[in-house]
Amino acid sequence: MVYYLLSFSAELENLTDLQPRGGCDDPTYPYYFKVKCESCGEVSAKETCVMISEEVPLPTGRGTAHLVQKCKLCGREGTIQMITGQGQPLTLEQSQKEEFAKLMIFDSRGFALTDFSFTDGWKVQSLTGTIFDVDLSAGEFAEYDEKGECPVGIVNLRSKFSVVKKHERRGGKDVYI
């Protein structure tokens, strides 16, 4: 099993706390990305979609996963399980330092994860407290904050998948580094 951390960054103008609309563990937020078969190296032509609220039974009948899919080239089966509780909104401070914020951890068996796609379903807060619902599928967002009397915007969206390791803590939750 390989754990993949999906993290993201952007340039925020007069905004903070960029995250999926229902928070980083939003059960209805769709994560779109491509998968690469770890057996033959084939990359999926189409994006795969997973959501926390949608689970399917494993072929073995023991448990569930958020995705069970076969490689179209070699037929090897892979699974993906989403691990909640690890994500954080992207803050203005992180944006200014060009840091990435953690979004989600994926336990992937048989697939490497690549090419995350930003979609609709995000929210962000202006520095004066105005909440904006944001569609990031165009790769940017621009608006005017009437309360703060200033332009707000999001540009230079970036995402990356990184392999992380699970560290178990006694009496606490697991940490992925």
Image (cartoon, rainbow, N blue to C red):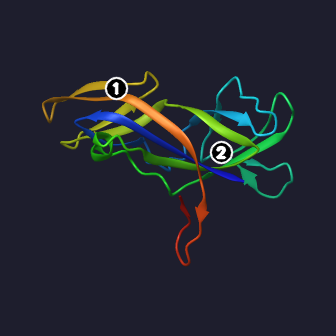
22 on left or right of 27: left
Where residue 161 appears, x then y in whole percent?
A: 56, 41
Q: Name the residue under label 1.
A: 141
- Disc marking residue 54: 2
69 on left or right of 5: right
- In the image, 115 versus 31, the foreground residue is 115
- In the image, 141 versus 115, the foreground residue is 115
- Disc marking residue 116: none
> What amino acid type is highlighted by mark number 1?
Phe
Where residue 81 appears, x then y in whole percent?
A: 67, 50
Instruction: Examine the rendered structure and indicate whether residue 166 appears above or below residue 107.
Output: below
Residue ID at (53%, 58%): 177
Query: Splitting the image into 4 quarters, where does residue 97 fall?
Result: top left
> What amino acid type is highlighted by mark number 2?
Glu
Where residue 74 appears, x then y in whole percent?
A: 86, 32
Give the farthest residue toward the left. Answer: 149
73 on left or right of 125: right
